[in-house]
Image (cartoon, rainbow, N blue to C red):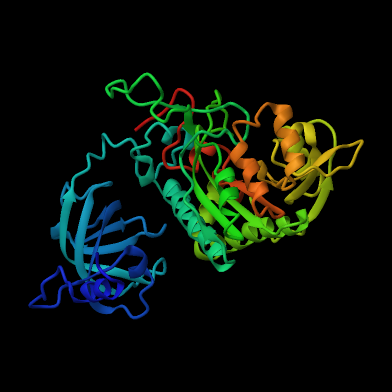
Amino acid sequence: MFGARCLLRALRSCSSAPCPRHKPSAKLSVRDALGAQNASGERVKVQGWIRSVRSQKEVLFLHVNDGSSLESLQVVADSSFDSRELAFGSSVEVQGQLVKSLSKRQNVELKAEKIEVVGNCDAKAFPFKYKERHPLEYLRQYPHLRCRTNVLGSILRVRSEATAAIHSFFKDSGFVHIHTPVITSNDCEGAGELFQVKPSSKIKVPEENFFNVPVFLTVSGQLHLEVMSGAFTQVFTFGPTFRAENSQSRRHLAEFYMVEAEISFLESLQDLMQVMEGLFKTTTMTVLSNCPEDVELCHRFISPGQKIRTYAKKQLSNWGADLHTEHEKYLVKHCGDIPVFVINYPLALKPFYMRDNEDSPQHTVAAVDLLVPGVGELFGGSLREERYHFLEQRLARSGLTEAYQWYLDLRRFGSVPHGGFGMGFERYLQCILGIDNIKDVIPFPRFTHSCLL
């Protein structure tokens, strides 16, 4: 085994690339090329896909995009470079000089000295056409190609930026990132909408199960985070979760991503809500700052009139029957189309792990949802029941004592007041981008009767 110092020394000394005899053209992303401050004829190399071709008598204009930005880089070349292979969708490598552009539409352009077609594209057979704005429903038919369109490119860049912002928020706040398992024997939500995991029929397994117990794809990492919160005061996870809901609605996916956090020594919903609000605001401000063009594209062409504001907080206590999507959206609209916290739900509606408020006759639990415009519920959280005897009684009434004996053990050995929440990541993207169908904010949507690729 390498010691830490030996490993560091080995990494410093190794090199996989021989020293070049001459200085090659600097390889730039389209984003970096467009942001170049001093474009004074530096020789560069850009790789990407052709978004448009315009040929004149003596000049050829190409727009090349590599996915690093919404804007494409204009390539100006001599007409001798013109070729049928230089078509919409073809992949190219262009070498030349990065110079200031005479056009008011862009600051720089690439004066081509060499253009190599890396991969041809039959523009006639390609399902997306230049200058044609295809509806999202049409793009959904081509999950292997739709990422090449401007709108999906913008959505996926925002998704990437939001992912990084969420990790940064938790890191800056002192949280420890936990990788919770995808395969589990627990049903955290208790809804029974689970995908069961079994070995392939080609694998010979004894009569008992592979794991000796029935196992499923996770619906939440919460219970595993609660285990970790007995050793770390602040933990979070961010990963895929699965629900076997037989629905093709615009709100449901069979596979989606959840951001979940658990905080020890937490005694009030107010403290939990501050973390939820901080995550929402910080992530959104980062996305708006780093991806303004991508967000604007979605607001302009997908959801005209969509605006993101810095919201004032309003709280709304509610008691009675469970809230459905139409009720959630009504509450948001009633409060001025801003995010709304709903707290203290009836105990009978919520899972066993939520803390009993002991407030008869209402008999509620310390639960909180954050409802947002256009989506409804975005966050769901609660204080957890840390009192052994309260939890024991709840589990006994549900017939779960044996299955969750390990969960009771967490209350026997150094239990502390704690709480946590989960945020549906795709719903968050729908909220800030104004996208109506959840299938359009995830690269490869999985839902009932559909698992393409």
Above or below, comparing residue 127 to residue 150 in the picture: above
* Picture quadrant where residue 108 is located: bottom left
In this view, the residue farthest toward the top is 207
**Residue 207 visible to the viewer:** yes
Q: Residue 302 at what x, y percent from top left? A: 55, 44
Which residue sits at x=59%, y=26%?
192
Above or below, comparing residue 194 to residue 221 in the picture: above
Q: Residue 54 at what x, y percent from top left? A: 27, 54
**Residue 303 visible to the viewer:** no
Above or below, comparing residue 266 to residue 304 in the picture: below
Which residue sits at x=37%, y=78%?
37
In this view, the residue farthest toward the right is 361
- 34 or 384, which is in the foreground? 384
- 220 or 429, which is in the foreground? 220
Q: Is residue 383 left or right of residue 5?
A: right
Total marks shown come to 0
Which residue sits at x=37%, y=18%?
207
- 212 or 14, which is in the foreground? 212
- Image quadrant containing the C terminus: top left
- 251 or 108, which is in the foreground? 251
In this view, the residue farthest toward the left is 21
* Picture quadrant where residue 60 is located: bottom left
Which residue sits at x=76%, y=53%?
269
Above or below, comparing residue 324 to residue 410 in the picture: above
Q: Residue 442 at what x, y percent from top left? A: 47, 42
Q: Is residue 381 left or right of residue 194?
A: right
Q: Residue 389 at what x, y percent from top left? A: 76, 41
- Image quadrant containing the N terminus: bottom left
